[in-house]
Amino acid sequence: MGVITMGMARLRMVDNRMGRWALRRVMRRFLRWRSQSGMISATRNMNSGGISGQRNTFGLTTHTIWLFGWVLITAIVLSYGYMWIARKFTKQFIWITGILNVVLGFATALYMLSRKYYSGGIVFLIFAVFQLICFISWRSRIPFSVLMLQTAIDVAKKFGHVYLVSAIGGLLATLFAAWFSVTLVSVYVKYEPDPNNPACRQGAGGCGRGKVIGLIAFITFAAYWISEWLKNTVHTTIAGVYGSWYFNSRNYPTKVTRGALKRCLTYSFGSISLGSLVVAIINFLRQLASVARAQASSDGDILGMILWCLVGCLIGLLDWAVQFLNRYAFAHIALYGKAYVPAAKDTWKMIKDRGIDALINECLIGPVLGMGAMFVGYATALMAYCYMVFTNPSYNVGGGFTPVVVAFSFLIGLQICNVFTTPLSSGIDTIFVASAWDPEVMIRDHPDLYHRMVAVYPEVQQAIHA
């Protein structure tokens, strides 16, 4: 046993070192390219001025920074409002989410189609139809989901600093999104190849289409990884708070939130970074498929558009499966302190052998919060599209930059809302994991919750005793 313990400790040490080294390397490169690409001020006469009166006709300008600023404001206001609705109207929350998401999805799709922006309109229309079908099929599972959401909110109000973590995480996500937006615009300003681009003659390195594509690919991947790491750090921290409530409700310890955050930033840092990296790679591949589909659509290649749409769907399914496993693996890491790979293996074994998949499938909170994040993404994408249409910047006369701006606006709104809503889903995920591994604690220390769960979903007895 001593050899096994030492081996596990060394594995965690290597895991942490690899995670720190990889994330630190990405951040260094991100900072380096950020400093090299900050040419907006050096070419102010070309890239600034009035919103629609700029002389730059070949790439993104400060107009786009203003646009992304409004996107950030919209995302943070809607995310705060969404969390407020969850706290004030818990029973109606699921219905409100479903209705708003479906209505705005159809509105965004129809408006884009009416403006003859067919590629974006068709994609949003498919999403809206799919979500409508899902929401109709979920109605029978709403009572159990409402109970779990009420439990998570009650614990968040009485124990730890759940909403403070959510607010700080959302603020950091917003600041990072602002930084990412400026960097994205700066890459186009500095490296977009055009005879009229004065930035090509300043600083080291010349302009080139390949350089622009490579830099955009790199900062997009870095943005996915860092935002996923932030979201998973918030998730694991909150899971530690709910785990303390689950196992120590009769003698609740002090400084729980601080201790959980400290473990995430030290002991479990490598595990969180590694799990986030897997998701970032998958999301990056899905983004590439989306760009390829949009390019095929603009070229009139119907076969290519269908092919890339199918590839995107397959990658989306893989993304769902990995994120599904990660949610419970990170909760397992918070409760039992294991490294990422052993925690993922134990989580998969738990889902197969303990019957916890019945609880997971019956609870709608994860999908509902995902729909809420999609709602914010729809809103930011629609706002960005309207902004581009009505301001009609000189660099977008032919509409070539519209897919890029809309896609990144959707990504910003989606990720910011995901960070804000993470505490609610984290609490429920932690309760499921803890009750699967230690069901006697649920029956002994939380009998009221257990009996209420049995009342709305009798199969819970078999699920946690399997």
Image: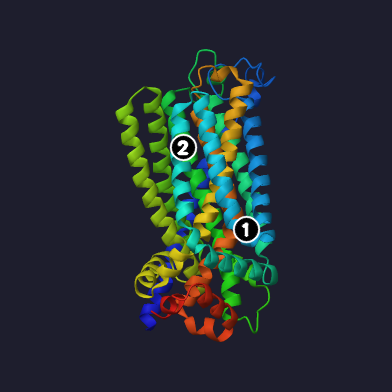
Give the quarter of the figure containing the N terminus.
bottom left
Secondary structure category for the residue under label 1: helix
The answer to whether any part of residue 190 appears in the image is yes
Please, which colouring scheme is shown?
A: rainbow
- What kind of residue is marked 2? Leu
Judge left or right: residue 227 versus residue 310: right
Residue at 60% in and 24% down: 61
Residue at 62% in and 81% down: 249
Label 2 packing within 10 angstroms: few (<14), some (14-19), many (20+):
many
- What kind of residue is marked 1? Gln
Secondary structure category for the residue under label 2: helix
Residue 309 position within the rendered picture, expressed as x and y whole percent measured from the top left: 36, 37
Instruction: Classify residue 297 by image quadrant.
Output: top left
Could you give the CA–CA distance between mark 1 and mark 2, rounded to whole angstroms? 25 Å
Instruction: Classify residue 254 by image quadrant.
Output: bottom right
Q: Which residue is mark 1?
A: 92
Q: Judge by depth and name the residue closer to the eye, 246 or 130.
A: 130
- Which mark is on residue 125? 2
Direction top: furthest residue: 195
Residue 215 position within the rendered picture, expressed as x and y whole percent measured from the top left: 47, 34
The answer to whether any part of residue 267 appears in the image is no
Q: Closer to the observer: label 1 or label 2?
A: 1
Residue at 59% in and 62% down: 424
Residue 429 position within the rendered picture, expressed as x and y whole percent measured from the top left: 51, 66
Q: Are marks 1 and 2 in contact (CB under 8 Å)?
A: no
